[in-house]
Amino acid sequence: MESFPKLFIPGPTYVPEHVMQSLTRPQIGHRTPEFSELMSTVVQGIQKLLYTNNHVYLASHPATGLWEMGIINSVKKGILHTVNGSFSSKWADVSKECGHPTGVLEYEWGKGVKPEDVDHHLSTGKYDVFAMVHNETSTGVLSPLEPIAEILKSKYPHVIWLVDAVSSMAGVKIEVDNLGIDFILASTQKAWGLPAGFAVCAVSNRMIDLAKSISNKGYFLDINVYEKYYEKMQTPSTPSIPHIFGLKYVLEQIKEEGLENRWQRHIENAEYTQNWAKDRGQSLFPETGFESNTITCIHNDREWDINGINDRLLERGFRMDKGYGKLRGKAFRIAHMGNVMMDDLTEYLHNFDEVLHD
């Protein structure tokens, strides 16, 4: 069997053989009782993981499609996006391309979203939808949701809240119903620890009702179409059934580990990696208090030869991240989410140290 480097990049993330094997189950028909049973099991598992009773949709495409689903099924007046990295910027661009009035609350890369800034922009009355990225993958910035939820509940209860949790869902505790999130999305190749090409979202009842009053949404991403099939625990079109079997298996693994243990493992992975970087004279790229639990973004203060380190790590069987976009070479990221256990992380960082000292 062909061998590839072990991934410590922010996505796709490391998928061990036992997880890959879960995708090799025999095919079943997507309009059969056995599929409905499979989907029901997966939906209930995701609801438990997200602490929600909201409907969960399974989408056989990247989370980028769910960006658009969230927008076209909610915006009537205007949408406010927070932008603090590459992916939050791209999501705002999608809103513009959909033709909606789009406001942008922009931060320097490395900064987190502040509730007082959200309050200031929403107070203009221009927006009926607010969209933010929970964990900005490009910068390793995690913006706490609780302070944002307090503002929205107390002052803007009519505003629909969309959250991109692509690199935090299944790695960070997100209590969707307590927070009041209307639409939360993620893809499977990050903290879910599965191959790419599949995405999930949870949608509130009020957003489902709102979508009924919005026309010209097309077909493929129309929530009302998803609802029609959701009642039968089916998807609108033929899905990637292997991914759904994979989700079932991963959810079983998560149940065995325990949700609180899983959240704590990601916290401990992050702390270990952050301390490793600081002990070697590097600083963290995110501002203090906004460090991610799933990705550590390290400012290359020591001006390490990232390309050279990457080449040496590849020889040892590891794939590193060299920085995203304009941060390439100036900062690099270490992913420690999903299937990455402490033993995997210490092995990688031990090899990193040996390369540094060669």
Image: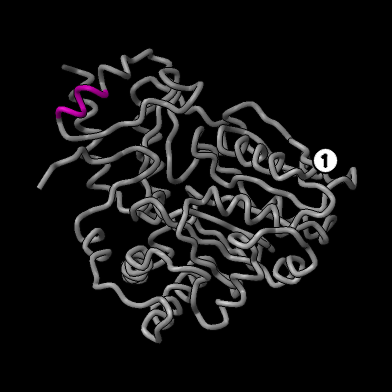
51 to 268, vertically: above or below: below
Q: Position of residue 137 (x, y in %)?
A: 49, 39
Q: Is residue 180 left or right of residue 231?
A: right
Q: Residue at x 82, y 53 (%)?
A: 128
**Residue 323 picture quarter:** top left
Colour setting: one colour
Q: Is residue 3 left or right of residue 214?
A: left
Q: Is residue 314 magenta?
A: yes
Magenta region, residue range: 310-315
Q: Is residue 152 left or right of residue 94?
A: right
**Residue 315 picture quarter:** top left
Label 1 belongs to which residue? Answer: 121
Circle 1 sits in a helix, a strand or a loop, which is it? helix
| Placement of the C terminus among the 4 image quadrants | top left
Q: Residue at x 34, y 46 (%)?
A: 13
Query: Residue 22: in sight, yes or no?
Result: yes
Residue farthest toward the left in the current orientation of the protein: 1
The amino acid type, in three-letter code, at marker 1 is: His
Q: Residues within 10 Å of mark 1 (few under 14, many from 20)?
A: some
Q: Position of residue 179 (x, y in %)?
A: 66, 61
Residue farthest toward the right in the current orientation of the protein: 124
Q: Is residue 35 magenta?
A: no
